[in-house]
Image (tube, rainbow, N blue to C red):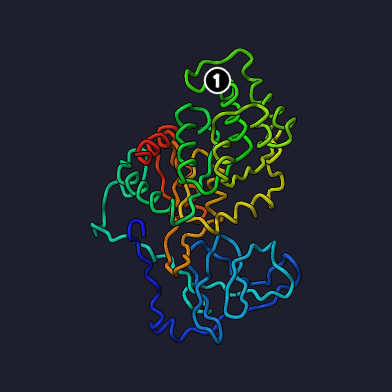
Amino acid sequence: MALNLTFTPPDFSADDLRDAPFVMVEEVPADGIAPRNYHATSNYPEYVNLEGYGWVLAPESRMDAVLVASEGRLEVIEARNLKKGQLVVVGRTENGEEGILVHPHCFERVKVSEDKFTFRSRGTRETPFSRSYDELYQILKHDRDNGHIVWVLGPAVAFDKDSREAMQGLIANGFCHALLAGNALATHDIEAAYFGTGLGQNIYSQELQSMGHYNHLDILNEVRRAGSIKESIKALNIKDGIIKACIDHDIDYILAGSIRDDGPLPETVADVYRSQDLMRKHARKATTVITMATQLHSIAFGNMTPSYRIMDDGEIRPVYYYVVDMSEFSADKLANRGSAQAQAILTNVQDFIVNLWNHLRK
């Protein structure tokens, strides 16, 4: 396993867990409504002491969902997706008192220093990220064939010639299994392929083009005229780009709509709950997530992504979650919302992706 982070399970022989009661469950009273006092999940591993089965680990989790029990199995379900009659775990303690155990400290690194006072104990723009890059290279090489790598991209990735080419190379070479974005990323990527601009600015020289502010609007119009992104790739004779690479290599991409969207592109999912369900399918499978220059998508996908995965061979491994941005805000906000495992790499996203591709292409 990448980085050799091994899962440490709870000690169920300890007195407090050995003598813990079985968990209580209550029926869902109506579709989409949880029983009162339901247990809301975290993104950490969670065990439930089920009568007749003992301590059972939820196969995956996410923030703010509920646990449904059925014949010794647990399922993590969003409350809006509950069905009348399902049995939901109730109880709001986390240390076994009600048969529920949240287990956050399962992948901890060994601390080199036990000093009570240290400088630079959290990541900032002053933090050196050489080790972070080296670890990420290793993780991506491992997960290309043994995991599910999800990229969450803001449009800034498409505004630079080299970063577009780098992301295209990563997709073409197996380092991306799903791409999540908004309408803007795809729009400006196709704009770059057709006009060589991003919001009217040349993606290499940065020169503003005459009437360039029409370019992305014309792209939206032409894609809608073609009926789909895939058909527009043919109609506009698009030769390169992030979205074309996804289509060429059969990589699932999900474009979640926003209130401010122009157009939007035909494939953009306007229903936020449907887009969440589509994104959640990849959150359940993710082993590595890299989000770049998109605060809302980073926070949203982070909150629906577990901190662990149970692999087909039974191995329990961490889900690596990287937030790449120029400021600490996205990573801090995500940690404040419960996804404390998110690791920040604070840099220009174009520099990050080019550096990553230059190393992995070797």
Image quarter in which the C terminus is found: top left
Q: Residue at x 57, y 49 (%)?
A: 300
Image x and y of residue 130, in percent = 30, 42
Q: 106 and 312: which one is in front?
A: 312
Image x and y of residue 45, in percent = 47, 67
Left or right for 292, reference 31? left
Image x and y of residue 282, in percent = 56, 54
Which image quarter: residue 74? bottom right
Which image quarter: residue 344? top left
Q: Residue at x 60, y 63 (%)?
A: 65
Left or right for 15, reference 89? left
Question: Are there few (<14), some (14-19), or many (20+) residues within 10 Å of tag 1?
Answer: many
Does 305 appear above or below 194? below
Does 127 appear above or below 304? above
Image x and y of residue 44, in percent = 48, 64
Does 204 appear above or below 346? above
Q: Would you name the residue on which mark 1 appears?
A: 201
Does 174 appear above or below 32? above
Which image quarter: residue 213? top right
Left or right for 359, reference 35? left
Q: Residue at x 52, y 84 (%)?
A: 21
Kind of residue indicated by mark 1 = Gln
